[in-house]
Amino acid sequence: MEILSLETSCDETAAAVVSDGTKVLSSVVASSEALHQKYGGIVPEVAAREQVRTIIPVIHEALERASVGWGIDAIAVTYGPGLVGSLLVGVETAKALSWVLNKPLLKVNHLLAHIYGAFLISPDPALPPLPAYPRIEFPFVALVVSGGHTDLLLMKGHTTYRWLGGTRDDAAGEAFDKAARLLGLGYPGGPAIAKAALSGQAGAVDPLPRPLINSPDLDFSFSGLKTALLKRVSYPSLSYSPPFPIISPLPPLTPLTPEQVNLAYEFQEATTDTLTHKTILAGKKYNTSTIVLCGGVSANICLREKLSVAAEKEGIQVLVPDFKYSTDNAAMVGSRAFFAPSVSLGELTAEAGLNY
Ligand code: KG4
Ligand code: ZN
C-alpha cells in the first residue's frame, strides 16, 4: 500500500511516498529556515506563506521520485500540533487531493509520527539490499524530544499508549534554540550548540544544573537551565534579548571564544544527562527491552551516544531514526498513517494544540 503523506506543522514543507509503512519511496523536505535566520526564530506568517508557495512543487517532486504518478492508495497529513497557519496549508491541500482523487484521507498526530521515523528504510536501487530492519515490537518506551515537546511514552501497541511524563516548562529543543541565541551561535540552535560543543572541553566551566534529575517522576524541566546559562554569559550584548528590535545577531564570523564553546559543551551535557537519565528510568520502571529516541533533538549525536551506552548497561536496545528522519519530514507521517490509520470522515481541521 502506497501512501502520499504531507507534513507542514512548522517551517518545513514536506511530502513523501511510503510503501507498507516502512519503505520510503521518496521523501522531499523544503525548509524556510534561511528566511527565519535573521529573526533568530521562526516567524509563523513567513513560514505559512512559503508553504503555500512550495507545497505543490514539493508534492510533484515526491511523486516523481517515487515513480508512482498519482497511483497512490491514500493521502496522509499532519493535523497537529504545530503552527496553525502552517498546518492549514497541509490539511487543506490533503483534503483537496483526497476529494479530487477519491482516495481516503488519513489524519496523523505529528508527535506520534516522530516515533515511526525510527522504523523507516530508504531502499536505494544503486546499493546492495539493506539488512533486515528492526520490526516494530511492543511494548517500548519512546522519548519524543523536539522543538515544542519533550515527552516519555509507553507504547503498548500502535493505538494503545500511555503518557509517562514530560517537560513541566520548556521543551529541550526550545532550550537548545534559546541557549544558542544567548551564546550568540545563531539559529537553528540545536545543530549550532552541537557544533560549538565539539570544540569545548569537559570541566572547563563550572557545571550547570541538571533540573529534576534526582526526582523519582518521569518529568523534565529546562527553563531553569536556560536561566542558569543566562547568568553565566559574561558578554552583556548577548546575554539580554530585548523584545524590540527582534532582529537577533547573526552567527559571528569571528572564531568562537573559549567561553562560547565551553558553555555550549556544558549546556549540551546538562540537557543530554537529564534526557538520558529519565529515559533509562522509564525503560527500567516499565521493564521494556527497547527505547525509541525520536524528534528533532534525536539528531544530537551526544544524546544518541549517551543513551545508547546507558541503555546497553541495562540490556535495553535503543532505536533512533536515520538522521534525515529525526527532524521534521513527511515519511514518518506516512508510516504512522499505515500502522494506525485514522480515516478522516468529517471536516478535518488543523489542531494547533493537539496532544496525545
Ligand atoms: O522535530 P523538529 O524538527 O520540529 C518540531 O517538531 O519541533 O525539532 C526541531 C528541534 C529544534 O529545536 C532544533 O534546535 C532541534 O530540534 N535540533 C537539535 C539538533 N538538530 C535539531 N537539537 C540538538 N542537537 C541537534 N543536532
Ligand atoms: Zn517535529
Image (spheres, grey):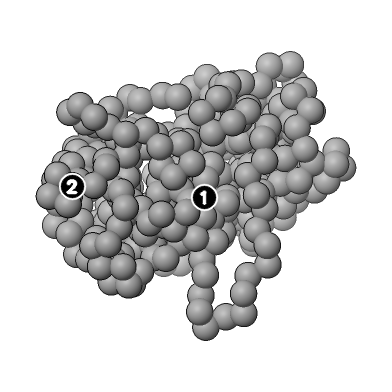
For the point 27% across and 62% down, which residue is it? Answer: 71
Dot 1 corresponds to which residue?
117
Task: Work out whether residue 101 or residue 273 is closer to the camera in this orientation and state it.
Answer: 101
The quarter in which the C terminus is drawn is top left
For the point 47% across and 32% down, which residue is it? Answer: 149
Q: In the picture provided, is 47 more to the left or to the right than 299?
A: left
Percent x, y of residue 163? 56, 21
For badge 1, the amino acid type reads Gly
In the image, residue 193 above or below residue 293: below
In the image, residue 168 above or below residue 82: above
Percent x, y of residue 258? 61, 57
Q: In the picture provided, is 351 more to the left or to the right than 236?
A: left
Percent x, y of residue 212? 67, 21
Q: Decide if residue 352 is in sight here.
A: yes
For badge 2, the amino acid type reads Asn
Q: Mark 1 or mark 2: which comes first in sequence?
A: 2
For the point 63% across and 70% down, which residue is it? Answer: 130
Is disc 2 placed on a helix, strand or loop? loop
The quarter in which the N terminus is drawn is bottom left
Q: Do the residues labelled 1 and 2 touch (CB within 8 Å)?
A: no
Q: Gap between marks 1 and 2, in whole Å?
A: 28 Å
Q: In the image, is the residue at mark 1 within 8 Å of ligand 1 by its beta carbon?
A: no
Disc 1 or disc 2, which is closer to the eye? 2
Q: In the figure, residue 82 lies in which quadrant?
A: top left
Percent x, y of residue 197? 62, 55
Dot 2 corresponds to which residue?
102
Q: Decide if residue 45 is in sight here.
A: no
Q: In the picture provided, is 149 more to the left or to the right than 292?
A: left
